[in-house]
Image: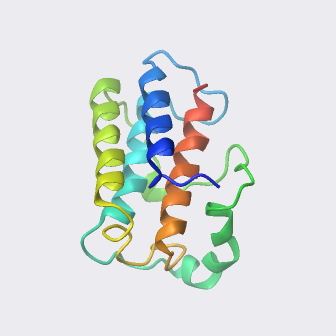
Amino acid sequence: MKNLFSEDVHNEILQRMDALKNNAQAQWGKMNVAQMLAHCQEAFTVPLSEKPLKRNLLGLLLGWAFKSQLYNDKPWKQNLPTAPNFIIKNERDFEKEKAGLLEMINAFYQKGPKNVGLYPHPMFGSFTKEQWGMSMYKHLDHHLRQFGV
């Protein structure tokens, strides 16, 4: 599994982000490309958080059963359910959201494995540093493929 802490993987994601255009059409799902970028930023708030996030009851009960799917080599299925706080329904500005996500991707990479994911994921619990890097890559890869890059 690719890891976002790897320089090559980080550069790959930056190139794919550069190829992403405002008129990109989703190959599945309900979000447009700007909403997807905002959604991915929400995901990055978890490992970049400087304070613990409240654990989700459903996650405490079932998160362990799905956790490994976040960082294994098997691609995610299309149209998987999304946590309510990660759902973006309002219209967003593509350029602003793209710049914001690039900033978060770079912050994650630059902070490195020792300085991200300091607290458990609200749904899936504690991750190793390697698992954080793999899961964030897998999430980005899923959504970039959703929009053809």
Near-viewer residue (5 or 98) = 5
Where does the image place residue 36, in percent across and percent down from the top left?
Answer: 47, 37
Q: Is residue 18 left or right of residue 102?
A: right
- All told, the count of numbered labels is 0
* Furthest residue toward bottom: 61
| Residue 58 is at least partly visible in this image | yes
The answer to whether 43 is drawn above or below residue 8 in the figure is below
Residue drawn 56% across and 77% down? 59
Near-viewer residue (134 or 119) = 134
The answer to whether 34 is drawn above or below residue 43 in the figure is above
| Residue 83 is at least partly visible in this image | no
Q: Is residue 110 left or right of residue 141?
A: left
Where does the image place residue 77, in percent across and percent down from the top left?
Answer: 73, 48
Residue drawn 37% across and 30% down? 91
Q: Is residue 56 left or right of residue 75?
A: left
Residue drawn 52% across and 67% down? 130
Position of the C terminus, as image quadrant, is: top right
Splitting the image into 4 quarters, where does residue 131 fall?
A: bottom right
Where does the image place residue 90, in percent across and percent down from the top left?
Answer: 38, 36
Where does the image place residue 99, in percent across and percent down from the top left?
Answer: 28, 33
Position of the N terminus, as image quadrant, is: bottom right
* Furthest residue toward front: 7
Residue drawn 62% across and 62% down? 71
Splitting the image into 4 quarters, where does residue 143 fall?
A: top right
Near-viewer residue (136 or 28) = 136
Splitting the image into 4 quarters, where does residue 96 fall?
A: top left
What colour-coding does the image apply? rainbow
The answer to whether 45 is drawn above or below residue 116 in the figure is above
